[in-house]
Image: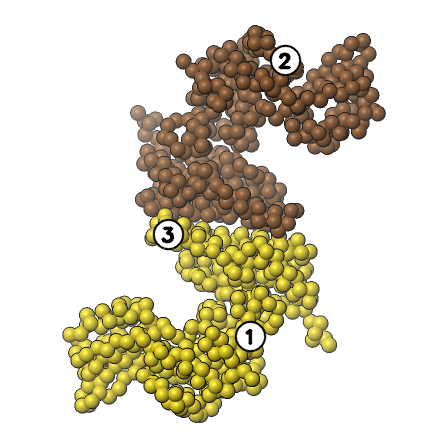
Chain colours: A brown, B yellow
Amino acid sequence: MTESKKKRRVVMKFGGTSVGTIERIKAVAQRVKREVEAGNEVAVVVSAMSGQTNQLVAWCSELSPMHDAREYDAVVASGEQVTCGLMAIALQEAGINARSWLGWQIPILTDDAHGKARITQIKTDDMEARLAQGQVAVVAGFQGLGSDNRVTTLGRGGSDTSAVALAAALKADRCDIFTDVDGVYTTDPRIVAKARKLDKITYEEMLEMASLGAKVLQIRSVEMAMKHRVRLQVLSSFEDKPGTMVVDEEEIMEQELVSGIAYSRDEAKITLLHVPDRPGIAAGIFGPLAEANINVDMIVQNISEGGDATDMTFTVSKGDFQRAKQVIEANKGELQYSGLIADSNVVKVSVIGVGMRSHAGIAQRMFKALAEKGINIQVISTSEIKISVLVAEEYTELAVRSLHTAYGLDAA
Amino acid sequence: MTESKKKRRVVMKFGGTSVGTIERIKAVAQRVKREVEAGNEVAVVVSAMSGQTNQLVAWCSELSPMHDAREYDAVVASGEQVTCGLMAIALQEAGINARSWLGWQIPILTDDAHGKARITQIKTDDMEARLAQGQVAVVAGFQGLGSDNRVTTLGRGGSDTSAVALAAALKADRCDIFTDVDGVYTTDPRIVAKARKLDKITYEEMLEMASLGAKVLQIRSVEMAMKHRVRLQVLSSFEDKPGTMVVDEEEIMEQELVSGIAYSRDEAKITLLHVPDRPGIAAGIFGPLAEANINVDMIVQNISEGGDATDMTFTVSKGDFQRAKQVIEANKGELQYSGLIADSNVVKVSVIGVGMRSHAGIAQRMFKALAEKGINIQVISTSEIKISVLVAEEYTELAVRSLHTAYGLDAA
């Protein structure tokens, strides 16, 4: 029984839609109040009211397309300043002892990369003393203080990162990210009606889910949570029920083989035919792409007919597709390929699960399920906890649904 | 010729309407640019974009009518933060080296009276070094840093005070207050078509003009300018021409006897008839009013008919009128007056000029001019540089016009 009476420390983060109106701010204050009345020490991290940041960014761009990032930071950080003052007032009105903290007041120290700064240190002595006295700390997300004594911001969606970093600094028992969905699902519920909300997911799996298009959490915040072992929870700010815990693998007793099926339509495929099969040819292809700041995802090299040459296939994001083709064609003389096949009507479908590390046959089940539906696999790539295949875009829904069933993820 | 080449230091302050839109901010940047190109060191103080502060205040009030002044300060100070970042961007876009300074960055130190803080010290070493290098300092008005390391604000219109305090700390040669009028006039141009813009006015006169209803400058900022001998200029942000200099008396070579005619309709008169003529009676009347936080302006005591009693007349602002009557009537038993006459249809008209200190007959000219128009004077009160009379409100325009002519203030 001692365990249940122990005072817990919780960081609660609310995004822009969760604090988008005065009414929503009042509702959030009630949510925070319940956490306080449960006997917890609470720090609240808030984003700007939805729409505010866009307005501030638009003003900066209207004045100058190439504006000074330090001034941009001073302007846009004001959005979170407003919300955190308002939230403190709302909490006080609800009878809760609370105060606001701006990034420079804590301080949340960052490097000087204005507009996309990285947190270097958070000094929490003063805040911890106040938490211990029962005061709720309301913290402006997204912002910090550079070594130049100027306001920095962490880049879009940075408030998730603020929350996780604060939770790490405070050694919080939990970091709750309140958003407009109620958790992480086995796959996109818009495609698979039988998608299930996961009670728990590992950091590694969440990273794969996030980077594959499940836009629930900022990738950076998940990386930071993993590094500092912060127990993250994704949950709805509109409903009062548990969400999905993102935790260390060891916390999940019976690990499913596969946790989810992700997909990304933001893929395009380029194949170079009959590239000379000699050392350095891969560097010759991918060097110029890297110089052009184009991210290459999947890469497959096959023996070509004949044997003295090879076919090279790779994928890039749809946004880089045209530019990637131009870069390759500009180097045609050196690369000596016989033809280039480009295709943006593709989708990447991935099966994710830490359980596959210790189990054979996971990939085989994927290939079989897709074959049964007559879906042709164009490219395969695997990592320790993920198998991705590229298929024609028209098969997206069929592939995701088939795999969801094949791995036993369908809700009863 | 050395004089003209000397580097001058100028503080330029722009109010809410002057920076109310992105277009206006760009126009202000051009105005600042001309000052820089004239070879001056320039600090710019900005208010929030017009309307922004009202929105922020409304949000605070909506959450809680009795909100924490520290949180209110954090919220409303964001308005000036936005403008000063945007102004720095606009200046940079115009090719001017510039950076923004928030209150806590300079810092502008204040006491801890949140919502109406007073500036205690401004540390300008870093800023002065940058000004000397040709960088324009863009400073958020209205805000400071309390000893509690929290944001403070200076009260409504506080940006004027920020500008004057900064000019004093920087030992600036001039503090230009850009507003939507082009200077200080001999009287209200809406009443007197022949009103003239003054080239110069003394601090003392400006204080009287300001407190009498010419709402060009915050009284507090004029007091501070007088104390620190800051040469103030009031001028238009919409036209490029000189405004009115507010300066030390010694700077004005040929002082006019009278500089202006002011009026205030915000007056109400209360007369107590047959008050016992004994020591302590004035204290008995004005003590309860002071306790009720009611400001009494003019006070006149006359011998009453009979001789054992006195009539006591005083004025209060129209906003305090009903409350003042209630306070007096609640004390009727002690005050023993025979009747109370209350009249809010009155106007206070004042003749202002430091020249009257050394010249006789100034008051006589006023009384004569009013008498010639058949205007009855109800109450008279005088100070060293001002004569005020209370007359029936319907005579406002006639009285002001007559006095403007009588003192030779009409434009040619």
Judged from the image, the secondary structure of the residue bearing numbered disc 2 is loop
Distance between mark 1 and mark 2 Cα atoms: 80 Å
The residue at which mark 3 appears reads as B61
Q: Residues within 10 Å of mark 1 (few under 14, many from 20)?
A: many
Is the residue B138 above or below the residue A41 in the image? below
Tell me if I can see residue A250 in this picture: no
Task: Say whether residue B87 is left or right of residue B143.
Answer: right
The amino acid type, in three-letter code, at marker 3 is Ser
Front residue of this view, candidates B46 and A23:
A23
Task: Point out the frontmost of discs 1 and 2.
Answer: 2
Q: Which mark is residue A389?
A: none
Instruction: Determine the residue positioned at 66% across, 15% down.
Output: A379
- Lower position in the chain sequence, tag 3 or tag 1: 3
Q: Residues within 10 Å of mark 3 (few under 14, many from 20)?
A: some
- Residue A156 is situated, as x and y percent measured from the top left of the image, at 55, 38
Q: Is label 1 in a helix, a strand or a loop?
A: strand
In the picture, residue B175 is in which quadrant? bottom right
- Same-chain status of marks 3 and 2: no
**A378 sits left or right of B197 in the view:** right
Residue B341 at least partly seen: yes
Q: Which residue is mark 1?
A: B244
